[in-house]
Amino acid sequence: MGRSPRIEFGGAVYHVTSRGNRQEAVFLDGKDCEVFIDALDEVCGRTGWRMHAFVLMGNHYHLLLETPEPNLVDGMRWLQGTYTKRFNGRHKQWGHLFQGRYKALLVDGEGGYFGTVCDYIHLNPARTKCFDLENGKLAEYRWSSYPLYMRPSRRPDWLSVERSLGRLGLMDDRSGRIRYQQHM
């Protein structure tokens, strides 16, 4: 039996995640993370995607993205294929990097689940003890959109924070970012 087709429509919001083949690492070092973020920048430019949150974690990643056009499949094919080629070339490897089909769950962009997914993605490094959450080090985890929420001068054009902050009644200003940090 074949796979069921992806549900795609303009304005859809997805929680996308993919793991390394055999749960092996897909990010071996900081340079790999930079290469993936560069590919994210490129795919958002190609597709018009709006990224609401992301995190890169050793053997997997999470994205909370919105597709103004129905192009999730084409964009993900390009993103994962391009990153795999760059990873394999850099590390002199070949073959599959990601395990099976990526997961893409539809998220109600206006409902409470959107906020739950956004918080889950931003807190993922804390759950895996990449740093001490009690000492406020979340903003130091470089491979997440969270530090970019806190430092708008470093934020790429494709990262959209308005919906994530707005669900809490916050603005994208100093006061709103401090309150978002307290929320996290």
Image (cartoon, rainbow, N blue to C red):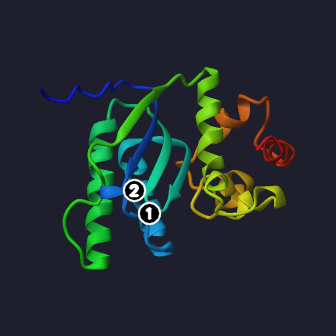
> Quadrant location of the N terminus?
top left
Farthest left residue in view: 1
Is residue 16 toward the left or the right of residue 174 in the image? Answer: left
Q: Please provide percent x and percent y for residue 106.
A: 44, 26
Taking the spot 58% from the left edge, 35% from the top edge, the residue there is: 117
The foreground one among 86 and 26 is 26
**In terms of secondary structure, where does tag 1 sit?**
helix
Taking the spot 47% from the left edge, 66% from the top edge, the residue there is: 33
Q: Hey, what amino acid is under mark 2?
A: Glu
The foreground one among 8 and 117 is 117
The crowding category of the residue bearing disc 1, from other C-alpha atoms within 10 Å (few below 14, some 14 to 19, many at least 20), is few
Farthest front residue in view: 22
Residue 13: assigned label: none
Is residue 58 toward the left or the right of residue 134 in the image? Answer: left
Is residue 84 toward the left or the right of residue 43 in the image? Answer: left
**In terms of secondary structure, where does tag 2 sit?**
helix
Q: Are marks 1 and 2 in contact (CB under 8 Å)?
A: yes
Q: Please provide percent x and percent y for residue 49.
A: 44, 41
Q: Quadrant of residue 14?
A: top left
Q: Which residue is mark 1?
A: 38
Q: Which residue is mark 2?
A: 42
